[in-house]
Amino acid sequence: MSIDPPGSGSTVRRIMLGASLRRLREERGLTREVAGFHIRASESKISRMELGRVGFKTRDVEDLLTLYGVHDDAERRGLLEMVREANTPGWWHKYGEVLPNWFVTYVGLEEAASVIRTYEVQFVPGLLQTQAYARAVVQLGYPDAPKAEIEQRVHLRMQRQERLTDKDGPRLWAVVDEAALRRPIGGGAVMREQLQHLLEVATLPNITLQVMPFRFGMHAAEGGAFTILRFPESDLSDVVYVEQLWGALYLDKREDIDPYLTAMEQLCVESTTPGGTAEILGEFLRET
């Protein structure tokens, strides 16, 4: 089976297909339970399909389209073609042995995003990490993992960064707490290289880097790190990703997203300006 190239977004295709199926079901006034019975499945499977959380069987989609009264050949072909696209594995699936199930969804969403806004308090954001810094972080998280597995995880992180330098790459807006920049992950030499790398990437036209200094006191995101993903497809809502110790939350309802959007806006206002970011990174470099 062919593999999606970076940026092709099969995860988003699943979400779009699921949203289309949900709209068609609701237009017919049918419950998930009725839809599930029609394809010999449970109500919860219909829910997962409509959220884009699982793969799609062509037969199931064909049967649902018939149930929903979709008989136009062109409309059916378009939706069934989306099934093929949604089921095409992304490049990251080759890392399946080391990629947690809850993180697979995030990598797919990140691949398809046009804007990535993130706040990080513990570490430098993964998309901005050097290889040595990433290795130190992975070793902290997986102290008993064999070297080959560590290197696989590091390589995955480096490959995720490749889209940032693509012509059609996403816009990244990162706010990093001073705590993450002062924590000497990997030792002095690794940290100096990391800080220098941040100075360099902050000059790229599609990357904005701000620092939330200690001196600013309390701020809008005291609850912890989060990422907001926005997509080029206008009918897809933003997704907020909140990582936990062994899992993650994916929020896409407006009432759940809005507080994070507000917090991010306030963080950007309260943090350093781009010029101030270069100044504070320079200070940290001189101190390490």
Image: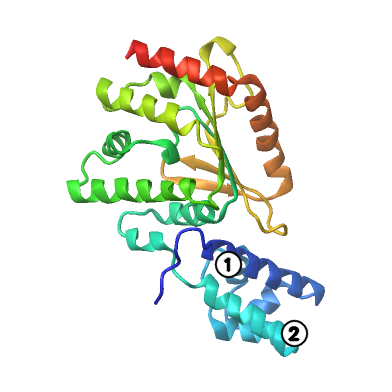
- The crowd level at tag 2 (other Cα within 10 Å; few <14, some 14-19, many 20+) is some
Across and down, in percent, residue 231 comes to 63, 53
Across and down, in percent, residue 15 comes to 61, 63
The circle on residue 70 is 2
Residue to which mark 1 is pinned: 14
Question: Viewer-proximal residue, 48 or 80?
Answer: 80
The kind of residue on which mark 1 rests is Arg
Question: Viewer-proximal residue, 202 or 261?
Answer: 202
Residue 189: quadrant of the picture: top left
Question: Viewer-proximal residue, 229 or 193?
Answer: 193
Is residue 187 visible to us here? Answer: no
Q: Quadrant of the N terminus?
A: bottom left
The kind of residue on which mark 2 rests is Val
Q: Quadrant of the C terminus?
A: top left
**Residue at figure coordinates x 57%, y 76% from the top left:** 83
> Disc 1 on helix, strand or loop?
helix
Is residue 186 visible to us here? Answer: yes
User: In this image, 284 relative to 264: left or right?
Assistant: left
The circle on residue 273 is none
Across and down, in percent, residue 5 comes to 44, 64
Count every numbered label the image shows and give the total.
2
